[in-house]
Amino acid sequence: MYRSATYDEPLLNELGDKSKGKPLDMLPPALQRKRTINIPTLDETQIVRHFFRLSQMNYGIDTGMYPLGSCTMKYNPKICNEISSWDCFSMTHPYQDESTVQGNLQMMYELEQMFCEISGMDSFTLQPAAGSQGEFTGLLLARAYHKSNKDFDRNEIILPSTSHGTNPASVTMSGYKIIEILSTKDGTVDLEALQKTLSDKTACFMLTNPNTLGIFESDILEISRMVHEAGALLYYDGANMNAIMGKARPGDMGFDIVHLNLHKTFSTPHGGGGPGSGPIGVKKNLERFLPVPRIVKHKDKYGFDYDVSQSIGKIKAHYGNFSVLLKAYIYILLMGSDGLKESSEIAVLNANYMKKKIVDSKKYDMPYKELRKHEFVVSCEHLLNKKGVRALDVAKRLLDYGLHPPTIYFPLIVKEALMIEPTESESKKTLDEYIDVLIRIADEDPKIVKNAPNNTAVKRVDEAGAIKNQILTWKSV
Ligand SMILES: *Cc1c(COP(=O)(O)O)cnc(C)c1O
């Protein structure tokens, strides 16, 4: 029993009486403790205040803006969380008989159809547990496709220099060779370089559109023609889908394989490493390779089909991260097609509003083409040359103002990059405050900025040391 200033004595005595002598007496004497154990005694109020204070040091989307570029840290309606936690969903077991989970199967079946509609693809699998696992799955599909065409020599995947780190990782994991092509001075795919690199060795070209600079690849139809003429496939990294929902579809642009990041675009809170989902969509000619089980509908009954002879097999235990799928389904129903389109429009408007004000301030540089979609990347190179202030310093200084920094040092082709994605969730007032602080930091005494954060519980950490000298076990002092 811990000591408590708030419990009254009679209650404590009563609890004490009830437990007196009970479980310990039943143990053989050799196993009984001879001394009282030395654990801290704290009172409840102190403990509650301690943990409540710790929770207030934390930062989340409910605290403020979270403009991590590429991550789409948008507001997720609480109702999606609430419904997905209802017992009727959360207590179903993956091995239950199909006849007892018809509602769940219907939801998944319909969600696949919705993704086909949104992305312009013919078929979807909901299995992959993240965008990166979707990439891996997509590349296995590409291999199965080429193999079925007796096209055994295609072992290269082409990536643009703007690609996200998971792209080369997935290429390597799936046993392919990475061929990187540089981008044009506009920050888009260099068609000449692409043409030179495409060959009968190319299995696939992976592309994000809009790309990681937030720039729409307007040559996409030409890119698609070139890739297909070389006998290769075109892969769509759909992490930036929040920019184009209801406006443009990767299927119509000529992509053969698409992944969507449900935890980014379709309403699952993320950032803490929780469950994600990266469904894969394909065109008809790749459908027969999709992972099993496929979700099928016969008359009015839903079920699993494991009998797909050319399937690449299973990618994830059971059927994907069900609660993430459910949140996406609720979100799409809530928003409707007009709502999804509007959210993309506002995401793009917010990004361009911020970009314009930041560029006009002349405090940060803006390499590459001006017009952006849902995110933009500015550079602190000028700030570094003039005052010795780096992107990392600006990011740390933002913490002093209670603001979450943007993504930094990505994409790699922008020096001292700040990658900002406000999403559709933020008000004009919030955007204005963020812009003002960014501009103010550029004018501050570099000593203060380089020592930041100054007002946080944890001061600047040694990030290289944190990786190299890890302390992974707790030691009592
Ligand atoms: C987030 C992201 C990925 C990887 O997705 P995960 O779901 O985090 O595995 C791939 N490409 C881009 C451009 C991304 O932003």
Image (cartoon, grey):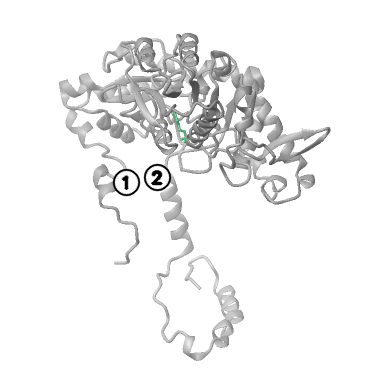
Query: In the displayed structure, would residue 15 be above or below residue 379?
Result: below
Residue at the spot of label 1: 457
Q: Secondary structure at mark 2?
A: helix
Q: Residue furthest bottom?
A: 29
Other-residue count near label 2 (Cα within 10 Å), few / some / many at <14 / 14–19 / ≥20: few
Mark 1–mark 2 CB contact (< 8 Å): yes
Label 2 within 8 A of ligand 1 by Cβ: no
Horizontal side, residue 354 vs residue 277: left or right:
left
Q: The C terminus lies in which quarter of the figure? A: bottom left
Res 434 quadrant in image: top left
The amino acid on which the numbered mark 2 sits, given as a three-letter code, is Met
C-alpha span from label 1 to label 2:
8 Å
Q: Position of residue 98 (x, y in %)?
A: 76, 45
Q: Nearer the viewer, residue 431 or 387?
A: 387
Position of residue 102 in the picture relative to residue 279 (left or right): right
Q: Nearer the viewer, residue 230 or 109?
A: 230
Residue type pointed to by label 1: Ala
**Observer-nearest residue: 319 or 282?**
282
Earlier sequence position, callout 1 versus callout 2: 2
Looking at the image, can residue 291 be seen? yes
Image coords of residue 245 (percent x, y): 57, 19
Label 1 sits on a secondary structure element that is loop
**Which residue is tagged 2?**
57
Residue 161 appears in view: no
